[in-house]
Amino acid sequence: MKKRIAALKRKTKETEISVKLLIEGQGDSKIDTGIGILDHMLELFAFHGLFDLQITARGDLKVDIHHTNEDIGIVLGDVFKKALGDKKGIRRFGSISVPMEDVVANVVVDLSGRGFFKGITLERNCQLAIEDASGYSLEYANHFFEALAKRLGMNLDIRLTSINPDLHTNLEPIFKALGIALDQATQIDPRRKGIPSTKGVID
């Protein structure tokens, strides 16, 4: 099978981002976004999804994290969409539950062409205001996932069973689970001869 690979660059007045992706990879990554915790989470995403992923980003971090964080999601979504092409033969759906300490992240994806993400759902009454020293938070993660889902054309559902006081403990199982679920969804099913939609197209 031809390897699905893509590379994209995006430059605005606020950010400059370069992303290279190999779907049929080994989980190797080289990530430098200027946002330390996001670098680590994207490394986990690539490792557990078995994607080879390179990301370089420079942004107006002296202002805040927002533009860089969101634009990385935009370009990552675009590069996955480009690498997947017409999506012939893909499984399309993926789902997994990943635990870390008292947190369980449940992630479900559908590469339907219709990007949708409503935010991380908390199955217990918890607050989302946890952040690390850089200012990164679950709300910033929401912005990243929304950009990724919309640009890729992915219906994305993320649920946490509880919130841990440590941001890392909440984010790590989410990014691991997203990598695994997206790996499932992008795999080729040898039984599927065409596009996995009764419409005959996923755009």
Image (tube, grey):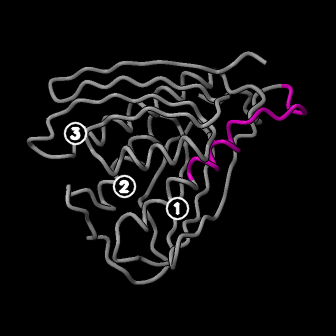
Q: Quadrant of residue 133?
A: bottom left
> Which residue is painted at 50% across and 53% down in the image?
175
Q: Which residues are magenta?
A: 178-193
Q: Measuring from the top left, give residue 110's x and y in whole percent.
A: 63, 46
Nearest-to-viewer mark from 2 and 1 = 1
- Crowd band around label 2 with a 10 angstrom C-alpha radius: few (<14), some (14–19), many (20+): some
**Would you name the residue on which mark 2 appears?**
142
**Would you name the residue on which mark 3 appears?**
67
Answer above or below: position of 66 versus 170: above
Q: Measuring from the top left, give residue 73's x and y in whole percent.
A: 38, 39
The extreme left residue here reads: 63
For badge 1, the amino acid type reads Pro
- Relative to residue 47, is residue 74 drawn left or right? left
What is the spatial separation of the Cα atoms under label 2 and label 3, in whole angstroms?
Answer: 13 Å
> Which residue is painted at 50% across and 71% down in the image?
160
State if disc 3 and disc 2 touch (CB < 8 Å).
no
**Would you name the residue on which mark 1 appears?**
173
Task: Specify which label sits upstream in the sequence, 1 or 3.
Answer: 3
State if disc 1 and disc 2 touch (CB < 8 Å).
no
For badge 3, the amino acid type reads His
Residue 154 tag number: none
Task: Specify which label sits upstream in the sequence, 2 or 1.
Answer: 2
Q: Is residue 174 magenta?
A: no
Secondary element at tag 1: helix
